[in-house]
Image (cartoon, helix red, strand yellow):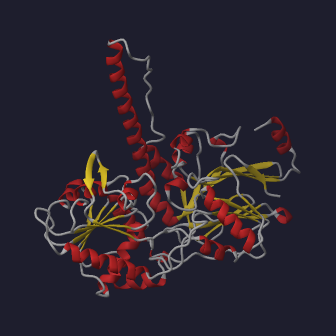
């Protein structure tokens, strides 16, 4: 902080509310919104979300805070929901001196008990892999030096951004709060979380900052969900904001308006017809469903149970081959107060996530057994959703080349991922774990399980604000989505819209 700013803050009459855009500004991931609030000569500093940048990992190793601010200067934090691009930077901040607390909904806190340590484990694995590749390069260079053709390479030890142990330590900073109950993390800062419907525990963050005539209402959307999705309650309306920060992930896209259950039933029934015919030596066909472990797998399980109960699909054995997904499902079971009416009614009759023949696969040995010849058709749900890692990769390696199998993708497949290569009709052979595999299995693609609101859903939610905010800041989108949603809001709602870039800041007057 500059001497001039310190002098200004020393003046008891100085009032200021400054918002810094430090992540997910002009990009989709890395959510980090930082506030400095000064009143009566005292300054409170806090963040809303602190996520990993998953598009450029090098960003996470830098100091992402405003110039002159240390992690130890931060008084508290607030999380909108549990996805790593919104929360995964917390252990790094803790390493640098942040001592908390961090407020989040109670389901979010429970999910973070699974997701943050896993993120730390991934950081350790990535550092180990970097060091392994470096050792290989140094060994090759040593051989070249012996021949007089090598370069002078200096060894460098790569350290993880944080470890699984440090991530578990960061969990101690969390403070669970209830939805729609106000709390005051600092004087003249009152916060309320309302349901965002994007994920179990996801919230819209509404803040009243300041007192008297200087009070400002600031709302952060987090990630907004779609109406009518399985399990959790719909997005709740918020009506008051002086300043609004809103995501724009689907700022130019509309979801298909169709019957999700019918589409899933049609896909499963087609796959079952293929799977009924055994092929030697592989046995009966398998229906592979790559899916995100938190949110997506639970939604699909709920729908499969309903379709089997209504006899719209056969009672096929379902194996959930993902320890993280199984732990996450236990969290979903723990919070029935977050269920929508249909799920709450189903829960009164039994477990809403268990099909008639249902098994949770935890050990690696159990997972390997699923790649043995199948005695009858089965469904395997496994992470990750884009098939970039996890046990699903091994199942695809074994099953993709067999024509009585089916691979069902349940959401968007990003460029460069194995999932995108498999979905692409141009790709006839894909490389999996260093091995080339021919695509003979049927490939199905359902877009109906996206947890993100499309631009029509976002506009519908924005229309609930009366009067209109002084300014809308659009974040969490690529350039096309940001520009598209900005144009739609300006044209339809006639709001003042700004698209900030990373490191921009604004004084909310």
In the displayed structure image, the side of residue 93 where residue 240 appears, left or right: right
Quick check: can you spot residue 351? no
Camera-side residue: 264 or 303?
Answer: 264
Camera-side residue: 185 or 429?
Answer: 429
Q: Position of residue 344 (x, y in %)?
A: 43, 82
Camera-side residue: 28 or 406?
Answer: 406
Q: Which residue shows up at 33% across the image and 80% down it?
A: 266
Q: Which residue shows up at 61% across the image and 39% down it?
A: 63
User: Which residue reaches farthest left?
Assistant: 280
Quadrant of the rendered image containing residue 332: bottom left
Q: Which residue shows up at 43% across the image and 28% down it?
A: 157
Q: Quadrant of the N terminus?
A: top right
In the displayed structure image, the side of residue 461 where residue 144 appears, left or right: left
Q: Is residue 121 above or below residue 381?
A: above
User: Which residue reaches farthest bottom?
Assistant: 310
Quick check: can you spot residue 431? yes
């Amino acid at each position: 902080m500059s001497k001039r700013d310190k002098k200004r803050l020393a003046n008891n009459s100085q009032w200021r509310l400054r918002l810094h855009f430090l992540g997910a500004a002009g990009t989709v991931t890395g959510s980090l919104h930082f506030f400095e609030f000064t009143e009566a000569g005292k300054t409170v500093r806090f963040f809303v979300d602190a996520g990993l940048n998953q598009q450029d990992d090098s960003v996470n190793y830098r100091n992402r805070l405003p110039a002159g601010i240390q992690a130890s200067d931060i008084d508290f934090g607030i999380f909108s929901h549990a996805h790593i691009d919104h929360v995964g930077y917390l252990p790094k901040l803790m390493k640098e001196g942040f001592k908390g607390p961090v407020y989040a909904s109670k389901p979010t806190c429970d999910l973070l008990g699974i997701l943050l340590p896993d993120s730390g484990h991934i950081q350790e694995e990535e550092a180990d892999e970097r060091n392994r590749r470096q050792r290989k390069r140094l060994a090759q260079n040593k051989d070249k030096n012996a021949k007089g053709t090598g370069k002078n390479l200096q060894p460098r030890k790569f350290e993880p951004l944080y470890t699984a142990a440090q991530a578990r330590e960061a969990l101690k900073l969390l403070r669970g709060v209830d939805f729609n109950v106000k709390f005051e993390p600092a004087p003249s800062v009152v916060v309320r979380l309302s349901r965002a419907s994007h994920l179990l525990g996801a919230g819209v963050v509404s803040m009243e900052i300041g007192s008297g005539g200087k009070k400002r209402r600031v709302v952060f959307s987090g990630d907004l969900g779609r109406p009518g999705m399985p399990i959790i309650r719909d997005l709740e309306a918020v009506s008051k904001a002086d300043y609004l920060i809103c995501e724009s992930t689907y700022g130019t896209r509309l979801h298909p308006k169709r019957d999700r259950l019918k589409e899933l039933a049609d896909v499963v029934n087609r796959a079952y017809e293929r799977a009924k015919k055994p092929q030697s030596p592989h046995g009966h066909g398998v229906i592979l469903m790559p899916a995100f472990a938190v949110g997506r797998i639970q939604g699909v399980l709920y729908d499969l149970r309903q379709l089997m109960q209504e006899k719209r699909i056969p009672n096929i054995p379902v194996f959930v081959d993902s320890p993280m997904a199984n732990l996450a499902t236990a969290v979903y079971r723990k919070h029935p107060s977050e269920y929508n009416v249909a799920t709450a009614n189903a829960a009164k009759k039994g477990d809403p996530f268990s099909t008639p023949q249902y098994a949770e696969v935890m050990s690696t040995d159990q997972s390997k057994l699923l790649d043995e010849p199948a005695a009858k058709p089965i469904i395997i749900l496994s992470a990750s959703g884009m098939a970039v890692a996890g046990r699903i990769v091994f199942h695809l390696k074994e099953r993709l080349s067999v024509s009585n199998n089916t691979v069902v993708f349940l959401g968007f497949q990003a460029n460069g991922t194995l999932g995108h290569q498999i979905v692409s009709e141009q790709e006839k052979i894909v490389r999996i774990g260093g091995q080339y595999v021919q695509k003979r299995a049927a490939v199905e693609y359902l877009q109906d399980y996206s947890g993100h609101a499309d631009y029509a859903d976002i506009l519908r939610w924005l229309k609930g604000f009366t009067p209109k905010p002084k300014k809308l800041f659009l974040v969490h989108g690529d350039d096309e989505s940001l520009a598209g949603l900005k144009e739609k809001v300006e044209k339809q709602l006639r709001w003042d819209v700004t698209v900030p870039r990373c490191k921009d800041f604004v004084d909310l007057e």
